Image: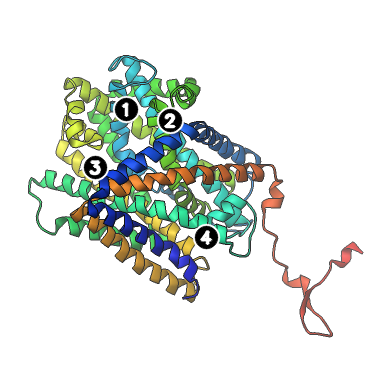
Amino acid sequence: MHNPPRIALVVIPFFVFAGVWLIYRRGFGGRITGWTESVREMAIASLSWLYIGVGALSILAVVLAAVTIGSVRIGGRDAPARVTPAEAVAVGFAASTSVGLLFWAAGEPLFHAHNPPFGLTPLTREAQIMARSAAYLHWGVLSHMTFGLFMVAFAVATGTLKGRRSVESVIAGARRGRRAAWGDLLDGIVFVFAILALISALASATVSITAQGLALSGTGLRGGLLTGVLVTLVFTAVILGARPLGTSLAALSRVSLGLVLVFLLLVLILGPKGFIFGGGFRALSTMLSNFPALMFGGFLDDPRGWAGRWTITHLGGWMLLAPLVGYVLSRAARGYTLADAVRYLVFAPMLLSLLCILILGGLTLAMDQRTGGQIWAALPRLGTDSALLLALNELWMPRTMRVLLLILSALFFVTFAGAMFHAILHIVVPGDDADRRVILERRAVMVIGLLAFGFAAWCLLHQGGMGVVAAVSRLGAIPGLFITLGAVLTVFRFCMTAPRHLHPPRPPEPDDVGVHVATGAKVRIEDRRKT
């Protein structure tokens, strides 16, 4: 194979998974989880200031890039667009936080309302408003701005300046024609933790989707059902990621976005509109006016307090996934100016995330209050992500709403997993999509991914270890912090460069190329008008 060192970036993470899983099977799962949580808490305690600082600088870097170098066209002055503006918005939402947001937009506000920050009294009006404000910050602003940071860095470094398709280009911020060992090491670190997270997410999504389907049908779990759902999800996601972005991922994202807007509209019609809108818009105003308190308050005094358990934990998760998600967004941004790319792939999806939290968070808070806290009381047994399902049961047409939620869960997970695999495929096997060698190597990686992801998730489903693998994957937030810091510095460096210097040089025009009369070699002809 032409590129074996890069192919190893996909193979090695599965050996790491096998080692973690075998240690779990030997009875050391509790020790692994305890050790990883101890390391993560130590990192939060010692690096909390850096997490918060890098998160704030990421927001500044994205906005500054859109203002200062927004005229740079990604891919070059004549690059055609891969997706339409509507598809760009859909990809920016569906390929980033959609699958988690679908449930945590309802679950996190409920948790904060019962355990509010800053000494507020639980379940008061102020606590409920602050609860949605915190969810706005975590799932709206921080997530999309972190992904947008890597989109900008990849778009300029690899999409416009034609640097290597590698995290190395994001850190170096310069055009590099040769592969460097430290670049492969960076890619390997990102791939190990991202693939571990994707395996555990695949197993978790299989359980969630199967449970929703069984609850709707009223039947019990039959032999082979979990495996069938798993195979369907893996196969669809891998094929989706292997296809060109503009013909598959963008199209499915557009369908998913249309369906989620219909779902939100039905919730709005059937739910308590006054509670949703009144508290939701006030929470948005509270987030903007209290942004420093939500972002920075408390972590200097007690890093293991509210900010450490929520804001920094969320930031670490976004930093873990951001290189791969940002790479997909940068490919979708090709053909647009940087300002338009930020508008379509960062700001518009962020507004959609805020809308989901406004409607779904408001619904769950209202229904929990109406039922006297029954939804909150059921969460320890069913999990925080079940809050939305319990809230939908209190609406008219609950079955129809849950069917829509089941379809959305499957679509959004497949889109997210397909986007991750698309990034893995194009970073591991760079090159022209029409090149036969590139096509063959990508097919080999596709087969490896199909078998490895499916078997690894099957082991977690039927033999256990899902929580242990997820705990190990969260350690990726530590190297992710320093990679994100490198991306911030790179984007700031781009912002201090004149936009004309960020365009690749045009190839020589045909009239500017001649033949040397002595050697017959092609040479560039100087412009005689200057003499």
Can residue 430 be seen by looking at this rendering? yes
Q: Along the polypeptide, which appears first: circle 1 or circle 4?
A: 1
Q: Along the polypeptide, which appears first: circle 3 or circle 4?
A: 4
Q: Position of residue 427 (x, y in %)?
A: 49, 61
Residue drawn at x 49%, y 39% as measured from the top left? 145
Residue drawn at x 29%, y 32% as measured from the top left? 106
Label 2 packing within 10 angstroms: few (<14), some (14-19), many (20+): many
Q: Position of residue 378 (x, y in %)?
A: 17, 30
Q: Is residue 445 above or below residue 412?
A: below
Mark 2 to mark 1: distance in Å?
11 Å
**Residue 356 or residue 424, whichever sits in front:** 424
Q: How many marks?
A: 4
Q: Along the polypeptide, which appears first: circle 4 or circle 2?
A: 2
Read off the residue under disc 4: 184
Q: Is residue 4 above or below residue 161?
A: below
Q: Secondary structure at mark 1?
A: helix
Read off the residue under disc 1: 109
Q: Amino acid at mark 2?
A: Leu
Read off the residue under disc 2: 137
